[in-house]
Structure formats: structure tokens, C-alpha cells
Amino acid sequence: MRSPIQTYLDDLYAQLLPLDSGELASYIPELAKADPGAFGICLMTADGASYRVGDADRRFTIQSISKTFVYAAALTDLGNGVAEKVGVEPSGDAFHSISVDPQTGAPLNPMINAGAITSTSLIRGETPQAQWARMEKAFEAFMARPISVDESVYRSESETGHRNRAIAWMLKNSGIIEGDPMAVLENYFRQCSILVSCHDLACMAATLANNGINPVTGRRVLEQENVERVMSVMLTCGMYNYAGSWMYEVGLPAKSGVSGGILAVLPGRFGIGVYSPKLDEKGNSVRAIAVCKALSQTFKLHVLATGSHPGAVLGRVYTGAQAPSRRAPSPALRACLAANAHRIKYLCLHGFIAVDGIEYVIRRMQELAPSTHSFILDMHEVSGISESAALLLNQAIRGFIDDGIATVFSRIRGRAPILDPMRSSARRAERIGTSASRDADQIGRQPSRRSDRGILSFEDNDLAAEWCENRLYGRPEGGGEDEAVFADSPLLGGVNDAIVREVEAATGSVRHAAGDRILQAGTEGDGRVFFIEAGHVSILVPLDARGHLRIASLGPGMHFGEMVLLGQSRRSASVYAETDVRCRVLKVADFERLSSAHPELKIGLLENLARDMAGKLQGANQWIAALA
């Protein structure tokens, strides 16, 4: 199934591709040779999943984005000593401005050229060559691959970087740079000429998002305290004299480069890399700015919005083999479930679900899909879902339908914070036509579920499991046999046929329409045992101020009310007809009369009843084990 995140990026790419404003950078001659139509986007999650579109693998020079990672390396090498040489105050000026502290001569922050050149000078190494080797390793650790330098861009920068030379000598004059400032400057020109792709930028950003651990290699690249320092400077200074508007409109730590790249981070969630070389008047990529705005606004990614790790929304994952429905299956259905119930997958969701959380859930569903026939999304502990997340989930559900996999919801119970976004996004998903919409209203037994615009929702996991079992069995209107013979009742197993015929002769036949209450919990027992010949019933126990809980669903060949045979006088559960039902009814008085004549009848029936109760206890323990 195609990922909804990938579909969104494809659509966003197509939407912004016609955006053709801006100019190529020309103050470095080699940058003016870039393809003005190039455009790529890559998003990488904090656990390493990536989505890309367009020229996401095209290489371009990193330029000022390198400042972020050289500053990170300097913090690693020098720690708090970096603050003695370069500050962290926003300048509000352009990238090549000369913004220094009037008393100390220290650059105001590491994102302007003066601060970046200073950061380069602070990298550990006895010689410029040793410093460059250290910088190479730092970049390779963030990118998860060996680096290379565009030598032509490097030469072009070196030959035309007169303003940067002036800045370097000024820093030398103030005692900020020690040693030869021109050697430092050549390393600075070289770091700006490192070749990267959108995928590389997204990986570097995802490493910051992942608290300094590269999600591709699993190696720690930067300590947590330095991750916080780097992203703080990115948030306040990374977009130069556009930083205030960026924070207001996008709200993500970011860094831009004059080659047309932008790197952005949603802490704890994912990294973004975008490339398009045509720049606005402030030196930022026009398309890349538009991409980041769209992502932030569509998916509510502003860093000041509260959130948690996306994986936190997914709790227990287990199968229908571990937690089958509570109905008593027919022999044919039991055999089917024994072989295939593991293909029903429960996913228990938690908290408020935003777009990154649902991306994680969808990706997990995709991993499970090859061995799955139906998904049950248990929403019991979900407080709400954003409309953008609901849209992605609805698109995913339609994609799974095309692959023959059903997805149903459990325990939403009319909660508007979940249902309203799901309904709205279902309509949007139908309009954009991600795949053919299927009418879930036509599937399932009416008393068991609720459908909202194709959202198939059940009151509890048991009803959802039964629907999925029926679908697995190939009979969505109800599994099991259509009718059963009284003599085949499990309670009468092993009893002499002649005696069984006497018992059947003593029974009467009753019928109930769908929805009828057959027995009421709490009432005095009337001394009757019911044997189902046709139809289905639900056994419900009352819950204090919380409705009821279905503890079993019974079909043809099954029985209920049998506890009166053990002397229980008060009904402990209610019984409702799910469909039209036909039963044979045996009165306790008739049973006692026949047992007096045939003691083996009572012995056999009580033995069968004990086995039945032991099986139910085993099933309950199985449920507890699955949920523990």
C-alpha cells in the first residue's frame, strides 16, 4: 500500500512545482550555473523512515547549512568555551553582515558568516588539515555516508570571498581567531562546498530530531545538551533577517543556504530537507519556504505546540488468536480460526493522535499487512485525532481495502474529538479519490456496529473481533452454521441416543425476533435451559453506570440458561436475540424427572457442563494474558 505521507508529498510537489519566482545566487559564480527548475523534498522520521519526491537525491553544495553542524562539532570539542568566542543572540541582519559585540569583538551568533568562521577556527586539530579531517568525520556522522566536496564551487568561493577575508582579519584583530585566519577561511570555504542531497539534509535534521542519535546508523552523533543548544540557535538565528517571520509562520528550528537548500527539524519527530535554487530577496529558497510553510500549517508542526514521541500513540499489538471473540464457534468456524485467527491484528492507540503519530501507526500497519486479513484499531484510550491525521488514516484504510485488508474501529463510543475529524476527513478522502471508497454500511450485523461515512465502529473489541472472524470465515453476516440439530448439543455429548430422544420429546419450541430480550439479568430464574437451533444471541452482563459488557455470542448448536441446572435461582446475565432465533427449551422439572429414570443423563450433562465452564475459563485467561 502506498503511504499517505508519500501521497501528500507527491501532491505538495505537484502543487508547488509551478512556483517559479526568485533568482539564482550569483555572488558565487558557480552557484549561478544551477538548474533553476531543480526541486526536491525529503522527510525522514526520528526512527529512520524516509519519504522523498522530485530531485531529492540530486547533489548540491550545502553552503550556510554547514554552519549548524560545524557549530555542533565545536560544542563537542570545546564545550562551554565556544560561548567565549561566539554568542547566541539573533542579529536580525543578513548572513554576510558584520555583527559583533562592541566590547569583545565576538560575533553575535554562529549562523552569520563571522560566527561561522569563528566556529570553524574552534574545531579540534593542531593544523588546518587536522581540523578539516575532524570536520569531515563530523559531517559523515550526521549524513551516514562519506562526504565529497565540489571543487569548482570551492575554488569559486575562495576566489571571490573578499568580504569573508575582511571578516576573518577583523576577527584575528579582535583576538577571536588564533593562528592564520586565511587557513581557517579556506576550511570554511571548503565546508560550504560539501555536496549534499535533500535526503542527506533530512537525515542530518532527523539526527537532531532524534536527540543526537543518527536514525540510520543508530550511533550517537551529538550529546543531548548540545542538541538543545544547536536547535535553539537554529530557531532564533537560522533564517537570518527572516527569522522572526519564520518562527511565526513555520515555527521549526531551521537553517537555509544560498544554494537553495533548507533543513528543518521537528524535535522528537522528524527532519525535513528541501532543495530549489531560486532565492527570494533575503537569500532563502522560494519553493523550500513554501514547502515548510505548507507542512507546518497542514500538519500543525509548530515547535511550540505540545506533543510527544509519535511511537507513544501505539500501545499493545496482538492477534485474534491471542484474543478471539467471546462467541462459541461452530466446529467449522473453530477450525477456520485455529488456522487463521492470527491474521486479525489489534492495535491499541493512546492519547491525542497528530500526523506524526498516525504516520508511525500506518507504517506499523504496513509492516503487519502481509500477514493480516483485518485490523482492529482500539480507540478506548484515544482523547482525539487531528483532522490531518484522520485524513491520512482514511487514505491508508482505503489503500488497505484495495489490498483486501479491512480496518475497523473499536470503542470510539460517540466521542466527537475522534468521530468529527474522521467523518470530515473521510469526505475529503473521497473527494481527492485516493482509491475507491467502499460502503462499510453494507457489511456486518446491525446491532453490532455503527458506521459513519465508511467508518466501521464497534462498541467493544469483542464485537469487532467477531465481525473480523466472520469476514475471515467468508460469512460477514454471521459465522457458524445456519441451523443445528438438538441432539448435537455439546451438553448432551456421550448420552445414549434413546435418552436424547426422550429429552427432545420433553422440550418445547420458542421463537424470538431480532432485538428481543429473552432473559433479564437480576430476575428470578424460571427453571428453563435454552438450546439454539437457529439464529444468534448475545449474553450481556450489566456494568455499574456504564451500560453492559457482552461476554458471549452464541449460535446454532449452543445453549444458555444452563446454570439453573446447578441450582442458581437468579439470572446473572441478560440474553438478547441478535437475529431471529429458534430454540428448544427444557424445563428443569422435566430434566429432573428424566434423570430419575436415567441417572446417566444427569452425570453426562454435568460432566459436559464442567468441561464447557473449564473451556470458558481458559478463554478468559487467554484474553487476560493477551492484554497484560
Image (tube, helix red, strand yellow):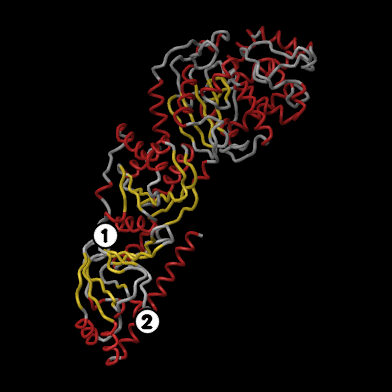
Hey, which quadrant is residue 453 in on the image? Answer: top left
Say which residue label 1 marks: 478
Q: Which one is earlier in the sequence, the residue at label 1 or at label 2? A: 1
Residue drawn where x is 45% and y is 21% of the image: 39
Q: Is residue 557 above or below residue 503?
A: above
Q: Is residue 316 above or below residue 90?
A: below
Measured as percent of width and height from the top left, residue 288 is found at 49, 21
Q: Nearer the viewer, residue 163 or 525?
A: 525
Q: Nearer the viewer, residue 303 or 1?
A: 303
Q: In the image, what residue type sits under mark 1?
A: Gly
Say which residue label 2 marks: 567
Measured as percent of width and height from the top left, residue 328 is found at 33, 67
Q: Secondary structure at mark 2?
A: loop
Measured as percent of width and height from the top left, residue 468 is found at 33, 55
Q: Secondary structure at mark 1?
A: loop
Is 376 on the left or on the right of 89, as rendered?
left
Q: In the image, what residue type sits under mark 2?
A: Gly
Is 384 on the left or on the right of 557, as rendered?
right
Gap in angstroms between the C-alphas marked 1 and 2: 33 Å
Q: Quadrant of the N terminus?
A: top left
Residue 187 visible, this orientation: no
Closer to us: mark 1 or mark 2?
2
Hey, which quadrant is residue 618 in on the image? Answer: bottom left
